[in-house]
Image (tube, rainbow, N blue to C red):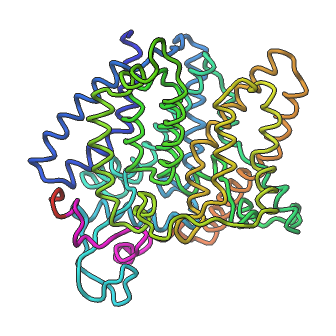
Amino acid sequence: MKKQYNIFWIVAYGYILLPFLIFVLGWIKLYIALPVTLVLGYCFYKACKESPSLWEPEWNRENIIKIIFIVGIIAIWVYYSGIGKFVFQNTDHPYRNGIFNILVEYEWPVLNHEILAQNTLGLHGSGTTGLIYYIGFWLPSALIGKLIGLREGYYAQAVWAVLGIILVYYLICVMLKKIVVWPLFVLIFFSGLDIVGIFLTGVNPMELESQLHIEWWGNPYQYSGMTTQLFWVFNQAIPAWVCTMLIYVQKNNRNIVFILACSMLSSTFPFVGLLALALFLCFSRKYEGKYLSSLIEDTATVQNAVGGGIVGITTFLYLSSNYSGSVIMGENIRGPEFENSLPKLIIFLILEIGVYGVLLYKYNQENKLFYFIMLCLCIIPPVKVGFSNDFCMRASIPALLLLMILVIKAVEESWKKKDYRVFAGLMLVMVVGSVTPVCEFKRTLSETFRRIKQDEIVYAEDTDMLLILNECNFAGNIDGNIFFEYLAR
């Protein structure tokens, strides 16, 4: 492998592995954490060494200007998402701010001995809870917050987000074999036809209020566009984007389990979608000679078996006492439930993915991945895990990102072939779909300026840390938890 390729893989694998390493050194007994860190360091080295060669841009003046512009647009996108508490934040942010504050201000591992009278975990004045949540995205910036200060930690959170999106966009350029700007705007404005859906519910699109989140039109079904994911669930979305693209560009299985495992601590719901993608790619590769022996040889690497095993098992043990985590890990006694509103489901699928599927079919008739993506996005919506529709919104993130990748490829190919019907169709659908992210930007801008004008704090008020540590969605009873009894400090 050429030396210049190692730089990207070092940064990319470092991005997905660093949160877990911080977790190990901060949460786990030192005599366990140190050898685990050394072993994972070796697995990291093997992953970088055995990664495929990638296209590399020429560092000429034109490309450097494009790169500066792209990084600037990504930074603006992150700035208006609410990450870093610079502008208005959507209603999910108070809890995310509270979790980040806990990570900065509490000692690791985070334990809570103050049990509220009406505790959602079933404790009443006794017992101990711990912060048990997919905290991976915050750990690098939380460490900076601990060392320098909370405000600086929020700044670092925004920088970490920008870096993740840069990695994703670089791989999009690798796919196209050139530094190009226009796919960045597809990334920002890609969404389903939610404006059509909300019109069908009886709301006049011309009278939309800035506070209305139009992707809720299909409740209980919802697929989130890229901007919506960034503005609402950045902590899950960005790591999931990075891991999806890393899995997508692999030409073999040598690192695929390692990458998959690294997603668990940050993107627990998207992990389900990533697992399906990884299995599909693993078993759809072609080998010379005996298939089974070649598949095992290709997959049973040190970084997969040892690195992926350590990261995956440790993360599983940590998350298993959280209600949401136990649902994902297969411990929901009731099992998944299925929504049965068939007419709404059909309309939802047509508007969110069906139109794209029809336009993409011409250039993907022989592409197995296309059929896999469409199948996943048809299966996911009816499944309900727990008490909300988070599974639909989050497990779909990898497949939605890959659907967008296929759209970018089709736009590029149809333009080159002068296939203006497909090109115009895709552009029209994307323009209509862009109303959703435009509404997200509109809400942020209008609320930010309104609050500035009224001399209010622009960002959301943080949820009380003690409330979070008594909430089943973010914490769990550590009594009897293998991780906290045998591994945690």
Whether residue 440 sits left or right of residue 422 in the image: it is left
Res. 196 image quadrant:
bottom right
Most extreme residue toward the left, as rendered?
31
Is 468 inside the magenta-drawn segment? Answer: yes
Q: Quadrant of the C terminus?
A: bottom left
- At a point 41% along the width and 68% down the height, the residue shown is 323
In the foreground, 208 or 118: 118
Give the percent coordinates (x, y) of residue 109: 22, 61
- Rendered position, 254 above or below 470: above
Q: Pinpoint residue 434: horizontal percent, then vertical percent.
A: 76, 46
From the viewer's perspective, tell me whether residue 282 is left or right of residue 363: left
Give the magenta part as a residue range.
462-484
Q: In the image, what residue occupies the spot 23% across and 48% down?
A: 24
Q: Vertical placement of 61 versus 487: above or below?
A: above
Queried whether the magenta region covers residue 156, the answer comes back as: no
Can residue 459 be seen from the camera position used here? no
Q: Is residue 303 above or below residue 179?
A: below
Which of the 4 quarters of the picture holds residue 184? top right
